[in-house]
Amino acid sequence: MLLDFHSEIYSWIRGGLFVLFIYHILIFFQNKNKLYLYYSIYLLSLTLYLLQHILSPEIKEIYKYINFPIQFLGYAAYIAFARELLETRTHLIKWDKFFEIATKALIVLAPIFILIQLFFGYHFQTKAFEIVSILLSAFSLYSFYIILKNIKDNFSLFFVIGSLIYVLFANISFAEHFIGKGFFINKGYEPMFFVYLGAILQCLIFSILIGFIIKRVEQKSKNAEVRLAVKLKEMEELKMTALQSQMNPHFLFNSLNSINNFVLKNEVEKASDYITKFSRLIRVILNSSSSPISTLSEELGILALYVKLEQMRVTGGFNYVVNIDESLNLERIKVPPMFLQPFIENAIWHGIMKKEGDKFIELTIKEDNGYVLCVVLDNGIGINKAKELSHMSQKRKFFGAKATENRIRMLYQNKAVQVITKDISDETRTGTQVTIKFPLK
């Protein structure tokens, strides 16, 4: 049975190699991974090489031209497969250059052996191949040593085991050229039986190895999806934290208190009006929270809603005046969301709220030599007096002012951003002036 290449065992091995070729080439077309392409070419080369023993005499004559070239191209595909499988470009940077040279040399040898057959005949081809095969075996064995020494994982170990099995059995068959074919025939099998056996064993090990790689890739993909889900959750939490920090919690608490007071005083219309304005402000803030930046025009719109609410809460109200330089295009000026609100809030609750008589806050926005100046001016009791009454430290400045200053610096990459708070109180007046300066983009 082992002397007949048409027997079932030989047919099963050839068929098995061809099925593996079809399977891996289909995987390549699906995911475009070169690993499967090179392995498919290697399997196809093995299959074509083993077909020579069952072909008609006419086709065998043609096979003399392509027998050794097929083997060279198959081995070149095998080296390319190994480079992809073991990631030698990363793990074996120096030795990978020799793999690349060997691959190119084998591709060049393929047409050279066709020319040798054309001009010198098959016998000369065989002698030349004997020399090349010895060099290839030596190169392979030393490469296996380098791989095991430098890449210490199961993938490299299984690769070397599978490769050694084929090299061992192929060299047993190759011994035919030295001890004669009769030695094997007398034992009851063709010399090529060992090539068949080595090929199918090697390919089974490689296929199992590729299966493990597919499983590893799938696991990495699952892990990446889990990490992505965690990051998305963290981002949502950060977004909510940022949203909560955009408005002073004291304002939200006090707003709800104001609604409660309106209801207790039976001021239903005021309560309804306040709730309407409050809900509009919250809705606008929620809509703008999806982006870390907004336009100055949007900021002033939100600020106007906020001030209207505060005017309803402050006893006697206060005047709010906005002066804008007409040369500025507010739609093109980028600012952090709610960046002016903390300064206006501080002007109200630490300035004008503690003052008797007329109260006002003036917001001026203008251009100054390529910069935007936002000036918040109030006629309250002044920052120095406010610190004395509320025991604010120098480091804290006004509530929220430092955090806002940091957000502006981050947005403009700390390029000449200034936030200056100054008490303008003197013998004739009291108040505080906050100047915010940032580049005009």
Image (cartoon, rainbow, N blue to C red):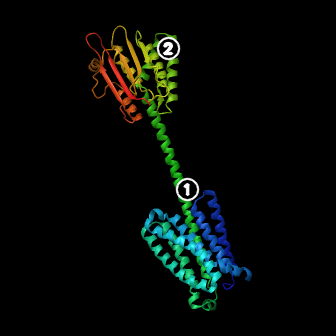
Q: Is residue 332 visible from the viewing direction of this image?
A: yes
- Residue displayed at 39% across by 20% down: 344
Residue 178: x and y in percent read: 56, 89
Residue 30: x and y in percent read: 63, 57
Residue 390: x and y in percent read: 29, 20
Relative to 10, residue 184 above or below: below
Q: Is residue 6 visible from the viewing direction of this image?
A: no
Seen from the viewer's position, the closer of residues 91 and 279 is: 91
Q: Which mark is residue 271?
A: 2
Mark 2 touches mark 1? (CB < 8 Å)? no
Seen from the viewer's position, the closer of residues 123 and 370 is: 370
Seen from the viewer's position, the closer of residues 414 and 234 is: 414
Q: Amino acid at mark 2?
A: Ala
- Residue displayed at 66% across by 84% down: 2
Q: Which residue is mark 1?
A: 218
Which quadrant of the figure contains the N terminus? bottom right
Q: Amino acid at mark 1?
A: Glu
Q: CA distance from mark 2 to mark 1?
A: 58 Å
Q: Quadrant of residue 343?
A: top left
Q: Which mark is residue 143?
A: none
- Residue displayed at 63% across by 72% down: 45
As helix, strand or loop, the secondary structure at mark 2 comes to helix
- Crowding at dot 2, Cα within 10 Å, few <14 / some 14-19 / many 20+, comes out as some
